[in-house]
Amino acid sequence: MFNIGEKVKCKKFGTLTHDFVGSIEKVYENSAMVAILDHDASDEVAVNDFHNRVIVRLRDMKKVS
């Protein structure tokens, strides 16, 4: 189970070409809203298009210690 505020590593998807690290802002049934904290420089345009927030499936993220 994931909780608000936890740091997670998320798999790439859509226009993001690399995995990224974020912080959970809201948890839904099968997904979570994640604020992107750290990403590859080549994904800068996509991250800006998403306004630094994405919805990620829970199965596509892992907790980061």
Image: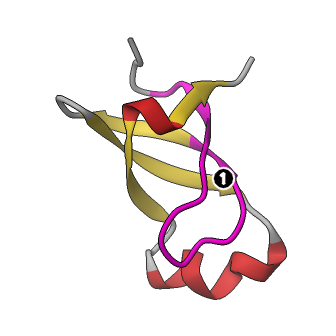
Residue 4, quarter of the rendered image: top left
Q: Residue furthest right?
A: 41
- Quarter containing the N terminus: top left
**Residue that appears at 52% across and 63% down:** 13
- Residue 35, position in %: x, y? 49, 52
**Residue that appears at 69% across and 54% down:** 19
What secondary structure prevails in the magenta region? Answer: loop
Residue named by callout 1: 37
Disc 1, SS: strand
Residue 46, quarter of the rendered image: bottom right
- Residue 62, position in %: x, y? 59, 26
**Residue that appears at 45% across and 75% down:** 51
Question: Is 20 covered by the magenta stretch?
Answer: yes
Q: Residue furthest left?
A: 29
The structure's colour scheme is secondary structure
Q: What stretch is highlighted in magenta?
A: 5-22
Q: Is residue 38 left or right of residue 1?
A: right
- Amino acid type at circle 1 is Leu
- Quarter containing the C terminus: top right
**Residue that appears at 60% across and 71% down:** 16
- Residue 36, position in %: x, y? 58, 56
Q: In this view, does 47 lie to the left or right of 19?
A: left
Would you place residue 49 above or below residue 60 in this image? below
| Number of dots carrying numbers | 1
- Residue 37, position in %: x, y? 66, 52
Question: Is 34 covered by the magenta stretch?
Answer: no
Q: In this view, does 55 lie to the left or right of 64?
A: left
Crowding at dot 1, Cα within 10 Å, few <14 / some 14-19 / many 20+, comes out as: some
Residue 2, quarter of the rendered image: top left
